[in-house]
Amino acid sequence: MNNKIKIGIPRALLYYKYFPFWKTFLEKLGLEVITSDETNKEILNEGVKITMDEACLSIKVFLGHVWDLIDKVDLLFIPRIESVEKNHFVCTKFLGLPDIVRNTIENTPPILSCDIDFNKRSLYQSMFSLGWELCHNPFKIHWAYRCAKKEQQNFEKIMQKQARTPIETIEFMESGRVKKERKKGGLKIALIGHPYNIYDNFINMGIIRKLEEMDVAVVTPEMLSHDKILKEAEKAQNELYWTYEKEIVGASHFLVKRVDGIIFIISFPCGPNSLTIEHAIRQIKNRIPTMTLVIDEHQSQTGIITRIEAFLDLIRSTKNKK
Amino acid sequence: MKCAFPHMGNYHIAFKALLENLDLEAVVPPPITSRTIELGCKHSPEFACFPFKVNLGNFIESLDQGGVDILLQSGTLGACRYGYYGAVHRKILEDLGYKFKLIKPFGDYKLRTVYRNFKSLKKELTGLKILHAFRICWAKIKTIDEIEHLVRKIRAYEVNKGETKKIHQEFLKQLDKASTIPEIKLVRQNFLKRFDSIKKNLTKKRLKIGIVGELYVIMEPACNHNLEEQLQEMGVEVNRPLCLTELIRHGLHFESKKSLRKIARPYLQYEIGAHAIDSVAHTIIFAQEGFDGVIHLKPHACMPEVSAQAALYRVSRDYHIPILFFSFDEHTSPTGIQTRLEAFVDLLWAKKH
């Protein structure tokens, strides 16, 4: 009989960034990690129904995933993140995430949270106090942290070296199955946005697969060296203080000379994106064709396909002229 | 050197005094009209927040007057979008072909940055002079807030309609003229007396409504379609705890936010950015003090206030206090606001009887 405590991690928001880290850490401390299903119609509809109407699509999806987990788990893992880099912040929605969930959904299982704030304490300290709530063995917590960190580094290395998406990498790390090689040749298009928008195949209608079907090689910020894009971002917009925005801005500047076109994906109405992507596009100007896709819960598949096709046609025709 | 800054309520009087005491020429942008908002929206990203668009409109209008070479934009540290306004404004205005320098004088609110930034505006400035200018600015801000707090309290009870508003306008003019601290104190005393002598009918029953929300839209009447005034004309006593004095006190740690955090704790375990905790804490305080209702204002899709909204729904349920939510952007129509306000006030009366 399996009597491990089940802890749920919603498959949304920062799942696409830190899942291997969280999973390893929690599993090493003797919990069973359960993720919600992949985003589907039911999850999205429920999320839209329960969330306050002006929250961004990503938050709605997140709450849908939490709803999906309610009956399946004993504990929910929702970290509160204020900063992941010194003197920088992340979007305010991550600051209040446990509170938003607690206030919106009444009958949630107890929420396990940790306060990650690099301006005040190190990641080790935050994770240690989280581990302390689960077991009172400092050596075990230390060991779990080390394993988790290693796993996370491995995860990022695979993504960058083999140009894989986080989903493919997580699958690869769990089952060892290697999916077919990433497409090369043809047009090279950068797909830039928050990881929870570009890799969630339901809310963006599987845009990566669609692009690859149209004979396009896709590059995303996660496939690039993290340090390089942060440096690029500091050069371009030195006042920027959101780390995740810096990744987006940095990646777009880094890729300007290396790809044929950039597609920005924004979830409606993302706060930080609304300013930073505008800024980035104004800086890129006419050096390269860009397109902004704003996704929300009323999106239709045809609408996205039409726009992608038009964008690709435009790039191909300008390329042929040259 | 001509400096322009964006509007916020009546505080332009204080900002003007600050700049003039630094021997800089202050340009107060034309008052916010529908044209300002239209201009701002035309050049702003689609779903940037409303204050961003209005501030941009202010800048464009003041640059169009000619001669302005420095734009001032306050910048706050914190995860909200407000701190990033400056950078995007600069880029948009540069793309429009204006020649100017945009400075965030307060930067990260460290004494050294403030000093350096003002020094970069004008070399002859000394620390003492900057300090003096800030003292006058601070005195004016405090006086404005004190008087406006009083106005909100008494206006619903006045016998001769419009009297309070008239004296308030006069007060603003007088305060603008006052240039030293004793003069400001004199103006304050004079007007406290004058407000005291207004004929009031205190026996009449009035509704009491608290206003909470995002700082810019609650402080700028042009953006919330004079919501406070509309309420007062319907005979409602309005209370709005959030004002620039309080913001500065909290921002500079003159006064700890701990007590507010403690009140909001059952709903918000963590800080959720900007002043969203204040909204929740003040709503709870209003409920405990027996207010009839609360109005929550925010620009469309304001990041921290949307998070606060989730908590406010629960506060409303737990404390049985009605909350009306308004969200402002360029498409908000004054008639819509008025209708909803009237309906809200009617419902509150029905609940009271």
Image (spheres, coloured by chain):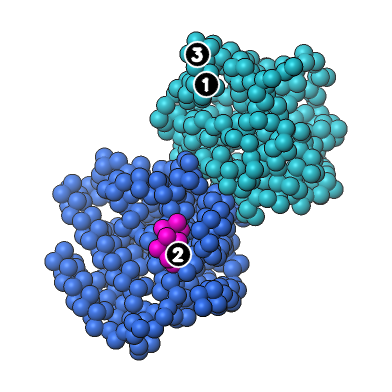
- Does dot 2 land on a helix, a strand or a loop? strand
Q: Colour of chain B?
A: blue
CA gap between label 2 and label 3 equals 49 Å
Q: Amino acid at mark 3?
A: Asn
Where does label 1 land, which residue? A131
The reply to the same-chain question for discs 2 and 3 is no
Q: Amino acid at mark 1?
A: Gly
- Residue A164 x/y as whole percent: 72, 22
Q: Is residue B222 magenta?
A: no
Instruction: Give me the residue at 81% from left, 29% from top.
Output: A186
**Between B311 and B91, which is closer to the camera in this rendering?**
B311
Instruction: Give me the residue at 35% from left, 54% from top.
Output: B247
- Does dot 3 land on a helix, a strand or a loop? loop
Q: Amino acid at mark 2?
A: Ile
Q: Residue furthest left?
A: B182
Q: Colour of chain A?
A: cyan
- Residue B76 x/y as whole percent: 40, 46
Instruction: Give me the residue at 56% from left, 53% from top.
Output: B314
CA gap between label 1 and label 2 equals 42 Å
Residue A88 appears in the picture as rendered:
yes
| Front tag of 1 and 2 | 1
| Front tag of 1 and 3 | 3
Where does label 3 land, which residue? A137
Residue B275 appears in the picture as rendered:
no
Quarter of the image containing the N terminus of chain B? Answer: bottom left
- Residue B149 x/y as whole percent: 33, 68
Span highlighted in magenta in the image: B283-291
- Residue B327 x/y as whole percent: 56, 62
| Front tag of 2 and 3 | 3
